[in-house]
Amino acid sequence: MSKEQIRQVLKEHGKFSADIDTLADDADLYEAGMTSHASVNVMLALEDTFDLEFPDRMLKRSVFESINAINAAIEELTA
Amino acid sequence: MTCNPAFPHFKLRQHLQKKTCEESVIRLGTDLVWIPEIQRSILQFGDRYLRRMFSERELQDCHSGQQQSYASLAARVAAKEATMKILGLNKDTALTWTSIEVVRRSNGSPGLRLYREAQTLANAAGLNDYVLSLSHEHEYAIATVIATSTVSGKKTNSISVRN
């Protein structure tokens, strides 16, 4: 369920040229066209969707580089 | 990078080339931002977005009348992105946007100040002097940063850039 919610956030805020549905869960989102600034929008939208806050230590590319990585970060923050 | 002189029998040129190889490290970063993208982020996420991206001083500097100047804020986003490019981030480097601050100098020109993790990265790269140029026109804002470093305790050649 959460991965589908992540995909929906990425669709609305990731600014991808490709269809997000064609990307695998482990696909590199930056290689798919997500910019650093777009990742800020993705982060804020994820905070709204999952009612959490990303701490400063998580503001790095590896946290937002794939759907799997985002999902792992959300699981850590909601554990 | 090799330091073999192009003209080994020309002593002055040999000296200058050696000096460049041993002392000068120059990094250039530039970034282009579409202003409506910044405007949309501000309208959608409001204060949460502004506080993640900008310092209090930057927000004050970009305040025009009753509203934030989207163009000025977009230029600062471009400056931060350009600076990130020269800091040599890897994917596991945690870097907050507010650790890179655009300031106004007393003569009105823009300058850069680095804090916390950005300063740590700059120190590791030996970067200690920055020249920043900002510009915006219609829907786009652009920033260029030139960083120079001190190697072996000697300061690099000075650089000047006009807006």
Image (spheres, coloured by chain):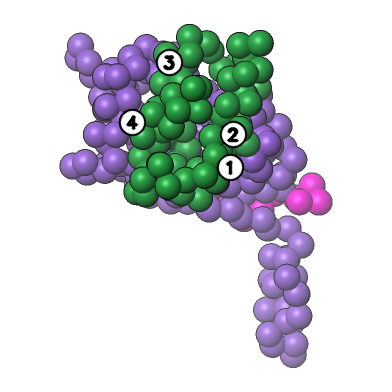
Q: CA distance from mark 3 to mark 4?
A: 12 Å
Q: Is residue B115 above or below residue B5?
A: above
Q: Which corner quadrant of the image does residue B37 belong to? A: top left
The residue depicted at 46 percent of the width and 20 percent of the height is A46
The residue that disc 3 covers is A49
Q: CA distance from mark 4 to mark 1?
A: 19 Å
The residue that disc 2 covers is A68
Task: Give the amino acid at mark 3.
Answer: Thr
Residue B43 tag number:
none
The residue that disc 1 covers is A26
Q: Chain of mark 1?
A: A
Which callout, 2 or 3, points at the residue further toward the start of the chain? 3
Residue B157 within the segment the image draws in magenta = yes
Residue B85 within the segment the image draws in magenta = no
Packing grade of label 3 (10 A; few <14, some 14-19, many >=20) is: some
Give the number of the mark in front: 4 or 2.
2
User: Chain A appears in which tint?
Assistant: green
Label 1–label 2 contact, CB within 8 A: yes
Q: Main secondary structure of the magenta part?
A: loop
x, y percent for residue B141: 30, 41
Find numbered disc 3 in the image and state the secondary structure of the residue it sits on. Answer: helix
Q: CA distance from mark 1 to mark 2?
A: 6 Å
Q: Which residues are magenta?
A: B151-158
Left or right: where B29 falls relative to B40 = right
Q: Is residue B111 above or below residue A22?
A: above
Packing grade of label 2 (10 A; few <14, some 14-19, many >=20) is: some
Left or right: where B123 falls relative to A29 = right
The residue that disc 4 covers is A12
Task: Give the amino acid at mark 4.
Answer: Glu
Packing grade of label 4 (10 A; few <14, some 14-19, many >=20) is: few
Residue A59 visible at all: no
